[in-house]
Image: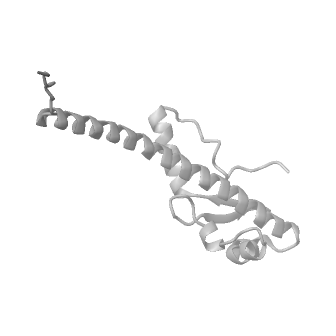
Amino acid sequence: MKKKKKQYALTLIEIMIVIVLIGLIGSVIGANMKGSLDEGRAFKTKYAMEQIKDILMLEVAKGVPIETVVSEKEKYLANSGMVKDAKKMLKDGWGEEFEVGNRGQKVTISSKALKAYQAKKNKKLGTSAASDLDNDESDEE
């Protein structure tokens, strides 16, 4: 006679513990992803601000008055051949419109959402230093 091995089944408590652990791990990963998404939006915003500024400054260098370039920014971005969708390009990573202006003969680009993100990040880090990501400072020529 052969002895049969006794098979143990998972109890309801064991299954519930596994589900709770999976939920905890998922919530930790989700919380970390939120910060990564905001960093990605900030990166996209900074890169877009640089591109827009460069393209519009090229138009100013061609002799177009800076006031005209700023007021008709979408037209000049579309005509540059470097941008697929000018309307989409004029929005930051959070979907808000960029503020495009001029200071003297310089095009200035800013984003309220990026400034808010940087302020929140600086507050979290405990720093009050001005961000080097702000594109409104005057550049040397």
| Quarter-of-image position of residue 20 | top left
Task: Tell me if I can see residue 12 in this picture.
Answer: yes
Is residue 112 toward the left or the right of residue 141 in the image? left
The residue sitting at 46% across, 43% down in the picture is 35
Q: Is residue 128 left or right of residue 110?
A: left
Please count the marks in the image: 0
Q: Position of residue 67 (x, y in %)?
A: 74, 73
Q: Nearer the viewer, residue 13 or 100?
A: 13
Q: Is 83 above or below relative to 40? A: below
User: Does residue 104 appear to the left or right of 116 in the view shown?
Assistant: right
2 w.r.t. 139: above or below: above
Whether residue 71 is visible, yes or no, is no
Q: Tell me the residue at 55%/49% (across/down).
A: 40
Give above or below for 32 relative to 38: above
Q: Position of residue 63 (x, y in %)?
A: 88, 72
Residue at screen point 18% across, 37% down: 15
In the rendering, at what x and y percent does residue 12 appear? 12, 37
Picture quarter containing residue 89?
bottom right
Give the farthest residue toward the front: 1
Quadrant location, the N terminus: top left
In the image, residue 6 lies at what x, y percent?
A: 13, 25
